[in-house]
Image (spheres, grey):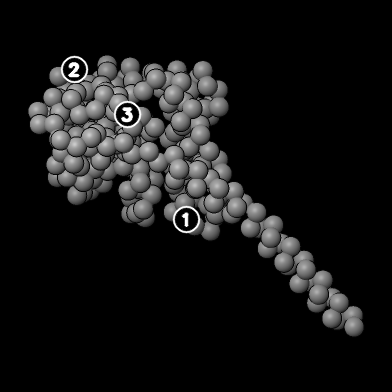
Amino acid sequence: MSLRIIGAGLPRTGTLSLKAALEQLGYGKCHHMFDVMLSSRQVNQWHDIMEGETPDWDDVFQGYDACVDFPSSLYFRELAAANPDAKVILTVRPPADWYASMRDTIYKVETSVPRWVQWCFPRIGKLTELADRLVWQGLFDGRFENESYARAEFERHVDDVKAAIPKERLLVMEVKDGWAPLCVFLGVPEPDTPFPRANDKGQFRRMTKTLKRLSIVPWILLGVVVIAAGAMVGLTYF
């Protein structure tokens, strides 16, 4: 099945809202980073692509009509070439707002994943490596914490998409603009319902708190071992 829509916008530009909007408009199932997180098969496929293996895009997106968000948005050129009839949607937002959102959600979660969790749970380890190599070390060259640099890279990505995709095939939009530009571009009627507003900041905050709690687990286990060893020594002595 060929993709009908390719989302070229970076994470935290309203990609989850766009996913919901496209699915509501009848564009089948829309691929998003959350789909990768929930599937070992997807994690392995994208990890292999990152390692340089030639992708079988039809297999990667089997069952999907559209894709948005990371990691697919970083491969917008390849996907546009592999799906010549697909339309491309570039979601954008003011760079300062985008940076603050990335810093306070995705980056905070990624930097909170304890090493022992990555070692004990291979899927999480591969996901962390995928994000680190493609985004933090790849797209942002290990300099995401430099706001000026990160914002410049965000703007460069936007310019790259505009330069690579013909105007008649590309929609540049902010999700705050609602249904009108999207529906005109796709040639479909506007729904009577409000445009989806998927705000997952709360979910990211909960994830970060959970990961911070997990980071102290090894120390708790070490304390238990020390106490148990001390108790054994005491029992042996007496």
Q: Looking at the picture, tell me which residue is in the foreground, 137 or 33.
A: 33
Q: Circle 1 — which element? A: helix
The answer to whether one can see residue 3 in this image is no
Q: Which residue is mark 1?
A: 122
Q: Quadrant of the N terminus?
A: top left
The answer to whether one can see residue 181 in this image is yes
Question: Which residue is at a point 38% across and 49% down the rendered structure image?
Answer: 37
Query: Closer to the camera: disc 1 or disc 2?
Result: 2
Task: Give the amino acid at mark 1.
Answer: Pro
Density class for disc 2 (Cα within 10 Å; few <14, some 14-19, many ≥20) is few
Question: Which residue is at a point 76% across and 72% down the rendered structure image?
Answer: 228
Q: What x and y, as percent, mark residue 223?
A: 74, 62
Q: Mark 1 or mark 2, which has the lower sequence index?
A: 1
Task: Give the amino acid at mark 3.
Answer: Gly
Q: Circle 2 — which element? A: helix
Q: What x and y, as percent, mark residue 11?
A: 38, 33
Which residue in the rendered view is the most extreme toward the right? 238
Query: Closer to the camera: disc 1 or disc 3?
Result: 3
Task: Give the amino acid at mark 2.
Answer: Lys
Q: What x and y, as percent, mark residue 74?
A: 34, 32
Please give the label number shown on residue 167.
Answer: 2
Q: Mark 2 or mark 3, which has the lower sequence index?
A: 3
Q: Which residue is mark 3?
A: 9
> Does the residue at mark 1 contact the one at mark 3 (Cβ under 8 Å)?
no
